[in-house]
Image (spheres, helix red, strand yellow):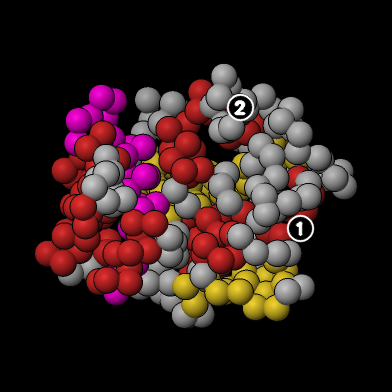
């Protein structure tokens, strides 16, 4: 198996599903992952050490680990008691590697080497980033507060000139297929895609750009959103796509019809998430139709 060169852009849980799907049809996969999370273990380590959020990077590394990896399972383990309660082992490992390596890209690559990851994971920015949202209720700061807030008109990543790693820009430039999402539209997907270097690379790439829509609105972040509302939000933030892949059997409204929308069966026995095998088939079909 070789397949197209694929880049997946977003946050933790959603992009991890995408990575598991892509591994069905490609050996060349790169994840470009938001480092803006400020909740949970990632948020605590950010506050304590002044480092970028590590949790979403961990989830994507684990998704690319060999089947049955004991180390991958251990990285997902969370302490239940004491001062480390709530921390994922993988977050602590990444924090230690960051101190040793001295840079985020090198830290994540070292973890990938330890795991034997079958692909590459890169941060969307090499510095800690902070989210700011503007909407009807004014300005909201922070990933957690934004995800729990009201209507969002604009998401901004701070610092506004937060640099993306050169490797991420090059991966987007050289890709055959780019998959954006699924995941929390503003606090995961756009948190990675609107980093200036990433957004610019998405505009200039010749790759097929696919947005994988969520299966249902995320309350309250995208409460009441239809598929067309998701597409409008991407366009409002300067993120253009060629295909919107969705499955509306779980109640997501289609909204205003668009020629970009492709319907496909993406739900498995767990109706809360995309089924990797079905998502792989839909993504591969989109790729073949683009040739």
What residue did someone put label 2 on? 271
Q: Which residue lies furthest to the right in this view?
A: 256
Q: Which residue is drawn at 61% across and 60% down?
A: 148
Label 1, residues with CA under 10 Å away: few <14, some 14-19, many ≥20 = some
Up-down relation of residue 31 to residue 97 (above or below): above
Q: At which x and y percent is residue 33?
A: 43, 55
Quarter of the N terminus within the rendering:
top left
Residue ranking furthest to the front: 82
| 116 left or right of 256 in image | left
- Nearest the camera: 39 or 167? 39
What residue is shown with label 1?
A: 232
> Which quadrant of the figure has residue 28?
top left
SS assignment at label 2: loop
- What is the quadrant of residue 5 in the picture? top left
Residue 275 circle label: none
Kindly state the secondary structure of the residue where label 1 is placed: helix
Using the image as rendered, state which of residue 120 and residue 11 is in the foreground: 11
Q: Is residue 45 above or below residue 258?
A: below
Q: Position of residue 165 (x, y in %)?
A: 36, 66
Is 114 drawn above or below residue 234 in the view shown? above
Kindly identify the residue that appears in the image at 65 percent across and 78 percent down: 139
The furthest residue to the left: 100
Direction from residue 93 to residue 212 in the image, left or right? right
Q: Nearer the viewer, mark 1 or mark 2?
A: 2
- The picture places residue 176, in percent across and down from the top left corner, at 50, 44
Q: Which residue is drawn at 73% across and 64% down?
A: 151
Give whichever of discs 1 and 2 has the lower sequence position: 1
Q: Is residue 69 magenta?
A: yes
At a point 59% along the width and 32% down the height, the residue shown is: 272
What is the magenta range?
A: 50-72
Q: Where is residue 45 in the image (x, y as percent from the top left)?
A: 29, 64
Please name whichever residue, 146 or 225, is drawn nearer the observer in this view of the structure. Answer: 146
């Amino acid at each position: 198996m070789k397949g197209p060169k694929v880049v997946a852009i977003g946050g933790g849980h959603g992009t991890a599903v995408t990575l598991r799907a892509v591994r069905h049809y490609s050996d060349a996969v790169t994840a470009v992952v938001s480092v803006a999370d400020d909740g949970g273990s990632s948020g605590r380590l950010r506050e304590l050490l002044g480092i970028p959020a590590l949790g979403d990077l961990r989830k994507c590394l684990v998704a690319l680990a060999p089947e049955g990896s004991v180390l991958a399972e251990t990285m997902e383990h969370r302490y239940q008691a004491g001062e480390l309660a709530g921390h994922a082992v993988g977050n602590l490992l990444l924090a230690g590697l960051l101190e040793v390596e001295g840079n985020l890209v090198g830290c994540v690559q070292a973890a990938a080497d330890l795991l034997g990851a079958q692909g590459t994971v890169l941060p969307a920015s090499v510095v800690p980033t902070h989210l700011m949202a503007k909407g009807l209720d004014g300005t909201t700061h922070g990933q957690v507060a934004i995800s729990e807030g009201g209507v969002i008109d604009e998401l901004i990543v701070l610092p506004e000139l937060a640099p993306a790693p050169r490797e991420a820009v090059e991966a987007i430039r050289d890709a055959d297929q780019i998959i954006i999402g699924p995941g929390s539209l503003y606090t995961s997907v756009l948190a990675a895609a609107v980093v200036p270097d990433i957004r610019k690379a998405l505009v200039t790439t010749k790759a097929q750009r696919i947005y994988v829509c969520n299966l249902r609105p995320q309350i309250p972040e995208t409460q009441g959103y239809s598929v067309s509302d998701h597409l409008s939000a991407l366009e409002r933030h300067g993120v253009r796509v060629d295909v919107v892949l969705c499955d509306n059997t779980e109640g997501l409204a289609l909204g205003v019809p668009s020629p970009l929308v492709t319907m496909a069966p993406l739900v498995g026995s767990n109706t809360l998430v995309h089924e990797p095998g079905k998502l792989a088939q839909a993504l591969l079909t989109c790729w073949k139709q683009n040739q």
